[in-house]
Amino acid sequence: MSRIARLSIATANQIAAGEVVERPASVVKELIENALDAEARRITIECQDAGKRLVRVTDDGAGMDRHDAVLSLERHTTSKLREIHDLDSLKTLGFRGEALPSIAAVARVEILSRPRQEMEATGIEVEPGSEPNVRQCSGPPGTSVSVRDLFFNVPARAKFLRSAAQEMSHIVDATMRLALSHPHVSFGLLHQGKMVLSTSGSGKTQNALAEVWGADRVQGMLPIEWESPEGVVIRGFAGSADAATGHRRYQFYFVNGRAIRSAPLRYGVDQAYQGILPSGRFAPMLLLVQLSGSMVDINVHPAKWEARFWNDRAMQDMVTEAVRGALGEPYRRPPSRGEWSASSSWRGESHPEGAHMAQRVQEPLFSPYSTPWEEQTRWEWLGQAHQRYILGYDGQRIWMIDQHAAAERICYLKLSEAQRSVAQMLLEPETVELGQAQHQMTDDCLQILRQMGFEVESFGPRTLLVRAIPAPLSGVPVRQLVTDAMERLGQHKGMWGLQEARLALAACHGSLRSGQRLSQVEMHALIRELLATDPPFVCPHGRPVMIEIGEDELDKKFGR
Amino acid sequence: MSQSMTPMMRQYVEMKNEHPDCILFFRLGDFYEMFFDDAKKAADVLDIVLTSREMSGGERAPMCGVPHHAAENYLARLVDHGYRVAICEQVEDPRKTKGLVRREVVRVVTPGTLSQLQTKDERSHSFVVAVSENQGSYGLAAVDVGTGTFTVTQFDGQEACKLFSDEVMRLRPAECLPNAKLSQDPAWHRLVDETGALPAEDDAGYFVPERAEEALLRHFGVVSLKGYGLEGKEQATTAAGALLQYLQKTQRIFLAHLSGITYYHTGAYMLLDEAARRNLEITRRQMDGKREGSLLWVVDHTVTAMGARCLKDWLERPLCRLEEINERLGALEELVGDALLRLKVKEHMSPILDLERLASRIAYGSANGRDLLGLAASLRRVGCLKNALAESQSSKLVSLHETLSTPEQLCNAIEAAIEPQPPVSITEGGLIRTGYDDTVDQLRLLAEHGKQWIADLERSERERTGIKSLKVGFNKVFGYYIEVTRSNLGAVPEDYIRKQTLANAERYVTPRLKEEEEKILNAQERLWELEHQLFLELRQSVLEHLGEIRRQAALVAQLDCLLSFAILAVENDYCRPELEKSKIIAIEDGRHPVIEKVLGPGQYVPNDVQLDEKDKRMLIITGPNMAGKSTYCRQVALLALLAQCGSYVPARSCRLGLVDRIFTRVGAHDNLSAGQSTFMVEMTEVSSILNAATDRSLVILDELGRGTSTFDGLSIAWAVAEYLHTKVGTRTLLATHYREMNELASQFHAICNMVVAVQEEGEDIRFLYRIVPGQADASYGIHVARLAGVPPVVLERARSILEKLESEPRNHNHASVAPRSSRRQLALSPQLEHPALRELKGIVIDELTPLEALNRLQRLQRLVREEES
Ligand SMILES: Nc1ncnc2c1ncn2[C@@H]1O[C@H](COP(=O)(O)OP(=O)(O)OP(=O)(O)O)[C@@H](O)[C@H]1O
Ligand SMILES: Nc1ncnc2c1ncn2[C@@H]1O[C@H](COP(=O)(O)OP(=O)(O)OP(=O)(O)O)[C@@H](O)[C@H]1O
Ligand SMILES: [Mg+2]
Ligand SMILES: [Mg+2]
Ligand SMILES: [Zn+2]
């Protein structure tokens, strides 16, 4: 049995550092936060080897004089907090006085800093376990902190670092978050000397958003502007269903300017998109929550990654309401919960800029909580309109179904089911002539086509011989099916997975296109098939398949 | 001898005689062959084997050749070595002619016209120029055949010759065509040597004014050149016409891509002479001529080649008119302030191809299906750019929105005709879209039916033979076949012909199958020929749109430049300069754009600049070597230049009164090739400054007078400064090591002394790179020598000499020499205090333990003692 012994200071520091410095991205985050606390207007982050070799953050903020610079490296020295009560009114991101000493315990750190009014800068170099080397030198106003060879003295931790690409994506992520929550600061992130990300510091969140996420993703986003009587302010931008992806990489949550991972906020957003997106798809989301310090505790996680709210459930519902408001769709809270729903202010608010979504869905979406499809027998089919929509009446509401979207959904689900790729042999093999474009990618595509249940082979220059097609698509004209599929695959060369290919096929060959007149029998068949699938009724792209008009709504329209 | 020559050799000699100054590329089958002396020269330059060919009765001629598909590279190498190459092609299909194939010279490739084929750097122009001089009036025309750029200008009056040379140096032509008068002028020859341009000869009276004008009128199909601003510009017109004729003669096509000619007047821009361009390293680094390390290298964020060329032009020719500058700045402000707009513009801009180069390829008949489709796609993007600008406010963007447009008709025509992803070759089918031409469709259908017939064969043959597993298939070597597995071989009918044996199957054909296959092939051959024909017609029809395409290209280029400036500003934290009519320069936290980039973030120390007409026209900057004097001066010039290009500038704020010219006199530059010594060059530059500077100019004088003895140098510098201050009234930055110059400040009220702050630390000095009011009290030259690794003995000796010199009274000196402060006194700036003092102030006594206090005390003492020893 070994005996208890006091850890050396160096060891203790290293262990403490473990909580703050997990990976290069943590260093980036801490240093940027310091720069922001120093009221920088411009922050540049340079990385070498995904931050493993070097992270350097340069700002043009307040700077430190020699005395402060030396102190900043000592544990529990901070200029931001004097006693614990200050936490409630904290305006800065830092407060523990832990970041710099923690980093300096596991890396070689160099600080160069100059307050604007001073002639000279102070340079400090320090290695774990040795005295800092302090000198005077030249330098611009502001501070630059270089962190080299992270974890060089803690091989056990260095081992846990991931590939350069992964570490770099963490760094990008950390930078994005801070850039988005501080749109008035201009950021530049460089990796191996190349600009990876930059923001203009224009002060407008939508600018920062576009600069960080790209124009495409941001274009359809709708502003969130919401406030509760309790003084909870929720702002941000909500993505449209079109921009949804299969991951949450573009969902950022902030509480009082601090990037947070928070289950209540996440749930709140998911709940808002219920019925708009199929599960497993996520719209881009920037959510900025402002609330008084007494309603939230941020001192939960050593890296300040988490927050605890005064009431998780209430927070979640507020988020849902705010996001729904932005999407132009009222959130029908289940009556059992949420006592303040009636008094809240969203109802009747107009969303003049809510262009995209709001225009498309003038009427409210069907409610995810009602279940009209159980008793199909009661349905009455009224007919087809615009050769595009099917109208029906279920005894209570009038329903409108987008026939193309419906067919798309059915087809997509069938294709997805066809995991084992049930192929339907053709009576006679058919030849399909390809355009030059399709021809050039045949080899890649044949592979995907085969996985989907096609049986194809090459048959002379620019020609395919098709022997079988996926069973769910039987009856579809073969030539058209294959050329369309190839064309869609071609537009996304190499980037397609099986799932996307299915989506593409379903999209173009829901076998029913809009503009097609349907017989009574065809309509019934389509509806039956549609209702046999599980809710929510949205097409694979997230667009609604059916919308309802209730009796009261009709009454209102007629002024009854 | 000629009697006994083979007919082909006779043809060769005929051609060669027409082009005696060229190497003749003579097309023979798949090769370009060269003979006689040409062969010897080429074999040498190209490092290829020299053989020989029978020429006449047993005589052999030296010969070498290059494969025609790889000819471009060889051509380029020959041209790079200063040769002209005439390309002689077969102009008849050898398969369809009996006897000798007709051949013609289709093009003469020269250094100035190589860019049509190949470019070393698509981001800059390659010009061929024609120059013409008469009675002190100079005309200068320039064409880049690769992009269709055609510009012309004329210089008259006193400064004409200098301005003309500066402009030629700016264009850096690859080839030049002088008129008779200039070609006899030694000054012109020196200029040509410096640019490295290959001179061409006027062997056809190109410069006869009437002929020149006539050529222009005919080419542009107009009756007067008024619309091009050439009226009354005799030399300009002659030069332009001469150049056009020269190109017509060598290029031998209708130069449809020279769709217009732009007359410009250099006086409309901020004037930068060759010295200023060189010293400020605008497009190339002085040391080695590389683009890297130049201002352009930092500034260029353009995404199209057109934009890149335009940006270079913008930087070389900053604007002078306030409205024009503000127009660019206004557009920039919008692009900087609206990220979505900026990103959308970038998104649509990036895929736009080099429209000017495409236009040129079309004119030269070398564009293929991909080029045409690329053209259409790029022009569609132009429409997207237009839409992206729909809600713009600034006048520049609004006008771009109004003028940008997609030539719909042209795009539709191309897109309707060409397959979405056509092959490189234009003779092997797959080029024309289904639905475009009935015959093409029919021929395709024929082939298709043939194939379906073969596919259907599977079922009918299964029925006929009773073999259930019988299959038809295709393979590249044998074509179509019928496959029967080994176990069914017994049932194979008589008429099957075995073609291939596999591990567990045999493959067969039948006569009927072969026949069907033959039909397919026949249809294909006709199809290919027809597709080729249709393509040529389409390409021909594009010619008449080249003017519009080039107009759009110019607009795209401008937008690209604005975008580039916006990205530059965002990525590097630049600010919008305020330009005004005053003569002020007020810069807060200015940075040198290039050095800042080279040093990286957090290194460059920003500095303020204050100049104004009344009280602060001239700054005399002193300070040690390496302290940053030159950097500071150039920084001011570069900021002024950038601002007048309409760019944001690296500073926190910047106010600038318009500058009409920037002059620089920097460091030493030998021009021995031009027969001038270092000092001579310096004085030539100084004299041109004194003669041409106005009260709107900005003058940078860095170590003026360095090239001669101290006293000569000092006297000249002094007199120049006085003159500029008093007589001209320019804004001047003067960096010098003559500390005596500081005296000027006390004699002239608009001259101020500035000094680069350093901190002395024992043996060492630290450069702080801060420019503050005051004057230097020592040069620290020996210190810098030590930094550079000069051996200690030499340093020691130097130090003792210096001491001796300094202790001697300067009896021979200037009337009044500024009183020198003691070397130890740190009088650079009041803000600099002793480190010990600062540390003492910083101590928080409450926090100190007695032991720590003692330690600190010891440290402080050591600091002070070190200082003393
Ligand atoms: N970029 C900077 N500019 C100016 N001062 C800084 C900068 N970085 C650090 N400092 C000073 O150094 C102190 C210590 O920084 P450190 O990050 O270790 O702690 P903190 O920010 O106060 O708290 P936390 O541990 O929560 O980040 C800060 O309180 C601040 O005064
Ligand atoms: N403001 C600055 N911030 C940081 N580094 C600078 C700054 N100015 C100059 N330097 C550095 O100092 C070097 C020398 O500067 P510069 O050539 O301007 O000195 P100088 O005073 O003109 O010297 P000399 O008298 O020898 O000509 C530059 O190459 C650059 O690396
Ligand atoms: Mg901190
Ligand atoms: Mg210098
Ligand atoms: Zn859809």
Image (cartoon, rainbow, N blue to C red):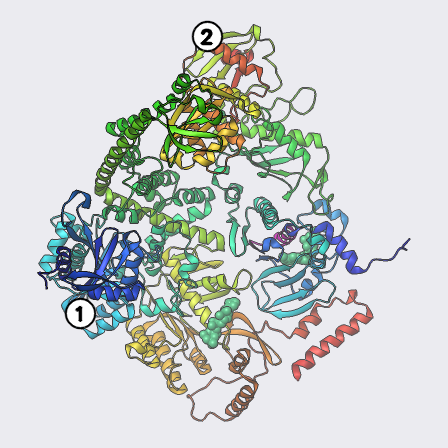
Q: What stretch is highlighted in magenta?
A: A27-44
Residue corresponding to mark 2: A520
Using the image, name the chain to which the residue with label 2 belongs.
Answer: A
Mark 1 close to ligand 4, CB under 8 Å: no
**Amino acid at dot 2:** Gln
Q: What residue appears at the point 24 percent right and 40 percent down from the top-left corner?
A: B539
Question: Looking at the picture, how far across and down is residue A336, in whole percent?
Answer: 70, 20
Determine if the magenta segment contains residue A374: no
Q: Determine the quadrant in which ligand 1 lies.
A: bottom right
Q: Please state the horizontal and vertical placement of residue A10, each as a whole percent of the image.
A: 77, 60
Q: Does ligand 5 reach within 8 Å of label 2's beta carbon? A: no
Q: Nearer the viewer, residue B847 or B61?
A: B61
Picture quarter with the N terminus of chain B: bottom left
Chain letter for mark 1: B
Q: Mark 1 points at which residue?
A: B182
- Is residue B548 in view from this perspective? yes
The percent coordinates of residue B457 (x first, y second) are 37, 22
Is B100 on the left-hand or right-hand side of B590?
A: left
Which corner quadrant of the image does residue A75 belong to?
Answer: bottom right
